[in-house]
Image: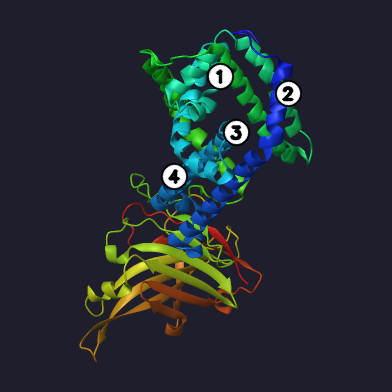
Amino acid sequence: MEKNQLKGIKEIFSEAGHLYTSRAIPVLLVLLLSLLISTILLVGGGITAFFALGGQPFFTGDLREILLNPRIIGTGALFAFVAVLLMIWCQAATLTMTVRQDIGILKGLITSWKYTFPLLWISTLYIGIIMAGSVFFIIPGLVLALSMSLCFFIMVEEERTGIDALLASRLYIRGHWWSTLLKLLPVWGLSFLIGLIPLAGPILSLLFTPFLMLYIVTVYHDLKECSGEIDPSSSAGWLWVLFGVFGVSLPLLAFIGSIVALGPQLPDIIKKVQTEVNRTLGTDIFPDEPQTDAKNIDYRAGKIPTVRQLPSVDGFLIWRDPIGDTHSHLLDIKEVSAKGDQGELILSVTTTRSLSSSFLAVKAGEFDSLISFYLDTDTNRATGGTPFGRQQGRRGYDLDVQVQLVAQQDVENKGVSGGVEVNLYQMDGEERRSWGTLESKAVTVSGDTVTIRLPYSQLETAPGDTVRICYREAAQEQGRGLAKDKLVPLK
């Protein structure tokens, strides 16, 4: 063959076929082993992270809170970075066994690690240059994509890294662009068609991958032999780096531009996206804004209780109340729950501090209101009363359950001890009639939690009924709105 004359496509296929018979199994084994090792590392890392973050109890809370947790964000970012590195290593291992025909499987796996970060850098520049070139009416991007496509093989065989590998590929293909395209199109098309075959497509694609890689290596060697010695280093290399960095930053620039352009429409768009996410996942990751007292709420405050479902306890509804919105940190509520089970409606209130700290801060005989529950036992808004004052859309509650922290004289210890008193009121319009005080055995205090048990008979309800419930945090200073209504089934 004369100098500067490339081999024909028939010769390229023939040489690639001979290489395939001797190298297909090693290349395929390295590909599968690298994928297996990466999967084991990712699964092991995922299990370790799962238990390190707290295991099942940590991940059974509010999905929105979990996703926004800094530890989850940090762990997720680290996990994603490791996953990308392992994916790049799999590609580097396959490239190493394809180009380096003088090494075995084990050495290929070990050697390929040193190409992981160079391959990541070259891939970033390659994608960036293509994206930047595509800005100029697409065609320049396609031309550059083919011209620099041999950079990955050059990195392994010639030990060129970064922009040098990309420019070396461009020099090899310069003057032979159409010829290279006509040689590569058939195998690319064949690979695409194989992948479309039902059921057997993925397996056949896997078996075809070594041939595709060896075929491209054969084209690369032919171009290299034809071009002779080349020197890709030039003072213009840094311009190509800047071009690639610009291309990689294009999505970020487009995102910032869209935010600036959309402007006032963003809240509505975000709301639509949140609604679609909730509908798709079938859960309230982004809960709707609860209804509030239009008369009394301080709209400058902005903190409104949200509600979530606790998956580990069937039927246990929990409101997550904003912390730091009360006039007394001793009365700040953290979460509230309601559950109907075995003939009792169980109401639970958890504060940010132990209840004993509240009792120590007062004198005997004093009391502090903690919370008021409003129950609509017949779920009929036309009957019952309003929680407080006249409200828009918040009526029909039949029972007011007021929880108070009461300080009592402790004669034995010569100090003050604490207790919880629960008063019941029947509601009718804006009037309230006392139903008396709940028996002390129906109220339990444990650390920072108060648990109240209301028998169905006292509520004039039965298993199978549904109760509508909301609450108001008594010490709330930033707004005086009610928590979102929830329908609680009585089992």
Indicate the secondary structure of the residue bearing disc 4: helix
Q: Is residue 364 left or right of residue 28?
A: left
Q: Is residue 354 left or right of residue 57?
A: left
Q: Quadrant of residue 340?
A: bottom right
> Where residue 77 is drawn, which disc sits there?
4
Q: Nearer the viewer, residue 48 or 7?
A: 7
Indicate the secondary structure of the residue bearing disc 2: helix
Q: Which residue is mark 1?
A: 145
Q: Position of residue 16 (x, y in %)?
A: 69, 26
Label 2 amino acid?
Answer: Ser
- Give the number of the mark in front: 2 or 1: 2
| Mark before the other along the chain sequence, 3 or 1 | 3
Q: Which residue is mark 2?
A: 14
| Mark before the other along the chain sequence, 2 or 1 | 2
Label 4 amino acid?
Answer: Ala
Indicate the secondary structure of the residue bearing disc 3: helix
Q: Position of residue 394 (x, y in %)?
A: 50, 54
Q: CA distance from mark 3 to mark 1?
A: 21 Å
